[in-house]
Image (cartoon, grey):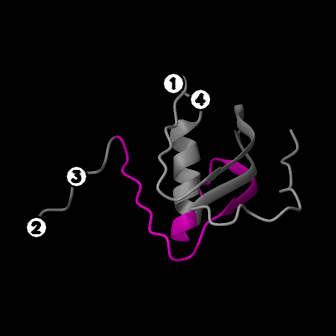
Amino acid sequence: MAIPSPSPRSPASGALLSLDRLTLETTAGPLIRELTFSLPPRRHLAVVGRNGGGKSTLLAVIAARLLGRPRPDWVRVGGRIDHPRDVSIALLPQNPAPPDIV
């Protein structure tokens, strides 16, 4: 499967998060194909789907991009993720690692 390039249009103005033709695929095959949306300020977003559908992978890829970290190495990413630089983000994993207690 070919990973698409983002469309030439600019990201949505004023959006806290914009995805443009985001595609995620693993060696097992595609998880998400050409997802495009914008999240305006003061709005909420729910990510729902079947088990193994790519929800956690989508959030991990978005969080990695927004936090300036490398994406998970087991997923190929195509498309564009845009956000204002002054926006904070946090990702709370479903099964967080316990804190180090000294």
Q: Identity of the amino acid at label 3?
A: Pro
Which one is in front, 44 or 62?
A: 44
Query: On the image, numbered disc 3 is attached to which residue?
Result: 98
Residue 96 screen position, x and y as percent: 31, 48
Which one is in front, 12 or 4?
A: 12
Q: Identity of the amino acid at label 1?
A: Asn
Query: On the image, numbered disc 4 is attached to which residue?
Result: 53
Q: Earlier in the sequence, mark 2 or mark 4?
A: 4
Mark 3 or 4: in front is 4
Quadrant for residue 12, please give it.
bottom right
What residue appears at the point 89 percent right and 62 percent down from the top-left corner? Answer: 8
Vertical order, 13 against 39 (above or below): below
Magenta stretch: dominant secondary structure? loop
Q: Badge 1: how crowded within 10 Å, few (<14), some, or many (20+)?
A: few
Q: CA distance from mark 4 to mark 1?
A: 5 Å
Query: On the image, numbered disc 1 is attached to which residue?
Result: 51
